[in-house]
Amino acid sequence: MSAGPDPASSAGRREIDGPGGLLIAAPLRLEAWAIASARPPARVLRIGMGARRARAAVPCLLDDPAIALLVLGFGGGLAADGRVGEAVVADVVQRPGEAPIGCQGAQALVDAIRSAGLQARRGPIVSVRRPAMGAARKALAEGGALAVDMESAWLARAARERPFAVVRVLSDTPAQELLHPRAPFAVARACAALRRVAAALHAWTPGE
């Protein structure tokens, strides 16, 4: 499998607002498909899962003429009251022990997502190299983050001076982790919510 980015699908390749508009970076094929199927006002690029693929995607994203970059996909909930299908909008992203990186338009994104009838809140998102479960998840939660992913902090380097935002739809939580028997149902619910988040982007202006 190539470590670099590739188009999600024929739908993902469609330039809805042209190359100078919003670019959505989605790690997984399933995520990219769900996002593109909602016909958001953006292009969708699948960059692959994990830190290595995120780093490999940075040069391509830096060269892209898009005026704003949004990382959109699934994430793991850290808050005890987090629910599968809830959207967490980052006001900062960071790797453990490193300085936070600011995101733009967080509250406007929360408002747009809530206007579509979805649960959404804003707060820190932490990026790690491997799935966080059990004690690792608890330790990250104690640091104050609301969600965890495996790409966003590395992809932040690709923002340049452009507005940069991150939204993660929770596919697992402390009460229902990745190996939970109902995990497939949780992923299906998260996928449906992700599609609705993508559609809600019509009500959001990057950078506001």
Image (spheres, grey):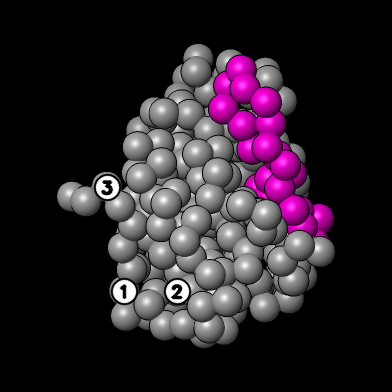
Q: How far separated are the C-alphas under marks 2 and 1?
A: 8 Å
Residue named by callout 3: 3
- The location of residue 171, given as percent across then percent down, is 49, 46
Q: How far separated are the C-alphas under marks 1 and 3?
A: 17 Å
Residue named by callout 1: 9
Q: Earlier in the sequence, mark 2 or mark 3?
A: 3
Q: Is residue 93 magenta?
A: yes
Amino acid type of disc 2? Ala
Q: Quadrant of residue 46?
A: bottom left
Above-or-below relation of 17 to 44:
below
- The location of residue 190, given as percent across then percent down, is 50, 55
Secondary element at tag 1? loop
Judge left or right: residue 200 versus residue 65: right
Q: Earlier in the sequence, mark 2 or mark 1?
A: 1
Secondary element at tag 2? helix
Q: Residues within 10 Å of mark 3 (few under 14, many from 20)?
A: some
Q: Residues within 10 Å of mark 1 (few under 14, many from 20)?
A: some
Secondary element at tag 3? loop
Judge left or right: residue 183 versus residue 138: left
Query: At 56% from the left edge and 69% from the top edge, which residue is drawn?
Result: 66
Q: Is residue 176 magenta?
A: no
**The C terminus is located in which quarter?**
bottom right
Residue named by callout 2: 36
Q: Nearer the viewer, mark 1 or mark 3?
A: 3
Q: Nearer the viewer, residue 200 or 171?
A: 200
- The location of residue 193, given as percent across then percent down, is 55, 62
- Residue pushed farthest left? 1
Q: Nearer the viewer, residue 134 or 14?
A: 14
Q: How far separated are the C-alphas under marks 2 and 3?
A: 21 Å
Q: Nearer the viewer, residue 95 or 29?
A: 95
For the residues bearing labels 2 and 1, Cβ distance under 8 angstroms: yes
Q: Which residues are magenta?
A: 84-108
